[in-house]
Image (cartoon, rainbow, N blue to C red):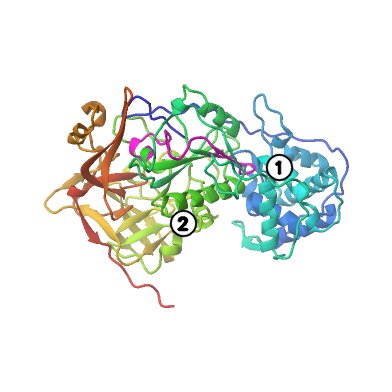
Amino acid sequence: MTVVLRRRQGPAGRPARFAAAVVTASTGLALFSIAASAAPVTGSDARQRQFAAAAAEFEVPQSVLLALAYRQTRWESHNGEPSTTGDYNVMGLTQVDLPGQDSPALHTLDEAAALLGRPAEQLRTDPQQSIRGGAALLAKYQKESGGSLGTGPETWYNAVVRFSRTAPAAGGNVFADQVFETVREGVARTTTDGQTVSTPADPALTVDRPVPARSATPGDLECPATLSCRGAWADDANYAVTDRPADGQKIEYIVIHDTEASYDDTVSTFQAPATEASAHYLIGAGDGRVAQLVSTGNTAWHTGNRTFNMHSIGLEHEGYALGRNHDRRPTWYSEQLYRSSAELTKYLAGKYGIPLDRQHIIGHDEIPKPVDSVPPMHWDPGTFWDWSHYMDLVGAPIRATTGGSPTVGGVVTIAPPFDATNRPPVAEVRPRPQNFVPLRTSPDDAAPLISGGTTAASDVRAKAVAGSSYVVADQQGDWTAIWYDGVQGWFPNPDGRSAAADNRPGRHVATPRAGVASIPLYGRAFPEPAAYARYPGVTYDAAVHSPVPLNMSVPAGQKYTLLSDTPVRGDNFYDVDGVRAVVTGEDTYYPVRYGHRLGFLKSTDVELTAAATAPYPAD
């Protein structure tokens, strides 16, 4: 969810006005009869056998069916719960009702149910029927595109393009290319519900690709050639015209958002001049298509915090952090969305030298308030954004830099498994994998959550999110405590299941300088007042430019992880009455991981100490 940073300078932003889609159920009538399936299959290889049976029944190549499903859902059933955009079950079939929209692409589940002559409910909840429905659709699309059933995988490219629900040039080709890449490379994994599925590599496969190859990305777009990108430029009233990084505004972060609206509605919102909000890119859920909305050299208003707007790139993802329909909450983001986003993140990180780690690839939920007076900050992409999978896709696994045992005074990285073994309660949703560990006041499952935290998805006060790093405050048995938001937060961590030590040598952590009871935390890194006088035409306004700390502090003895060992100089993009300048001061700050959200400590307030380490386990 993008928020506003107004064109006229002020401390706060206004939430963007997005409307949520409503996902509803429906059933279809059979258009023609297809043989009923056999009795349900059980066992850890049940899903593998279901793919084999469906491929044989509908005369589609098993490797293509498996690869297509992998690119849709990684073979996950998601317990019959919808994605953020209304995709269901193993094949990611759609069932979405949107006001004024009746596209067949929104009802592929109903189309498949009609082909099978089965109730739509079965395709939502039964993996076997979802796979059969996907195979039936693929066979239908093969015949509609002039192909024959029972042929080799090399002849099914156009059918896969049609399955993507997107025109070839708009992203269908990219989806099909990715599916056949999986056919060539092969893949194997165990799903979160214990199903072992694989498809062997076919590296020599040459695909008949009669549709025209998509054109190269136009020169004015900043996008990797592997993605289907288009320009959908935001109105210039919704961002600041800048010249980053040449003007001194170094780009250091990539911020992950969700839209809380459909792809098309999001584009329309950012193209409306009254919105006063924007992001740099938008990634679609169903097909992973990418739209660039703002040049990365310009400053999009997407975080509600001027410091982070100045130094970040915002990626909006089509989807909903929780959803509006209480009976059918979304529980997952689509695989195509993850993959396109990760490809874009790798490209942008390479272009601007952004480290591929969770200190620099962050969620909107990790952005702090700039000052205490602003409304509550946003919390997207929510508790079921799979950070572990996402960081795997960008080539920087969360546990890649971890090893050894946690030790008091050392750094630990939160890394719970995103599967059925980590399902902490979240209000108003059924149990599902989550991306966080809840923090308690003592090493006891019955202890309250810290800081008055609740199980509401929007309440991040006691949620340590995957990939974030903290300093170990204490350990008792299988429990680990970390310094978090000025207090100790405890979580169970038997055998390092929920977090792993980061024992890399040379790590430093921040603690208050000697002789003080506590030091203030800042939500933004603004320059000192005297800095403004050095810029012609710039006027310091204490009401909006003052580097005021938050009502938060770091007590003596506590330690917090640094996002970088090098402090940053306070700066502010000044844009008033036609006068523009990047005001840079002498005061410096260390960006730190304070709790769920980040923050800044003045370098004059802290001491850096070496993080404690423990030996890595023997090979």
Left/right placement of residue 246 relative to residue 75 reads left
Tell me if residue 191 comes above or below residue 16 in the rendering: below
Is residue 285 located in the magenta-colored stretch of the structure?
A: yes
| Between 284 and 381, the one nearer to me in the picture | 284
- Which region is colored magenta? 282-309
Q: Main secondary structure of the magenta part?
A: loop
**Residue 44 visible to an observer of this rendering:** no
Residue 50 spot, x, y in % from top left: 75, 57
Left or right: residue 387 versus residue 606 is right
Looking at the image, residue 301 lies above or below residue 161: above
| Residue 531 or residue 271, whichever sits in front | 531
Q: Position of residue 388 (x, y in %)?
A: 50, 55
Q: Earlier in the sequence, mark 2 or mark 1?
A: 1
Q: Residue at x 34, y 35 (%)?
A: 306
Three-letter amino acid code of the residue under disc 2:
Pro
- In the image, what residue occupies the spot 11% across and 52% down? 515
Q: From the viewer's perspective, is residue 619 above or below residue 90?
A: below
The numbered dot on residue 416 is: 2
Residue 121 x, y percent position in the rendering: 72, 40
Number of other residues with Cα within 10 Å of mark 2, as a class: few under 14, some 14 to 19, many 20 or more:
many
- Residue 137: image quadrant is top right
Q: Amino acid at mark 1?
A: Pro
Tell me where residue 272 appears, x and y as whole percent.
51, 24
Please tell me whether mark 1 sits on a helix, a strand or a loop. helix
Q: Residue at x 84, y 42 (%)?
A: 144
Check disc 1 and report the residue beneath it. Answer: 168
Q: Is residue 408 magenta?
A: no
Instruction: Please tell me whether residue 544 is drawn above or below residue 571 in the rendered image.
Output: above
Q: Is residue 46 left or right of residue 572?
A: right
Dot 2 lies on which element? loop
Residue 28 visible at all: yes
Quarter location, residue 401: bottom left
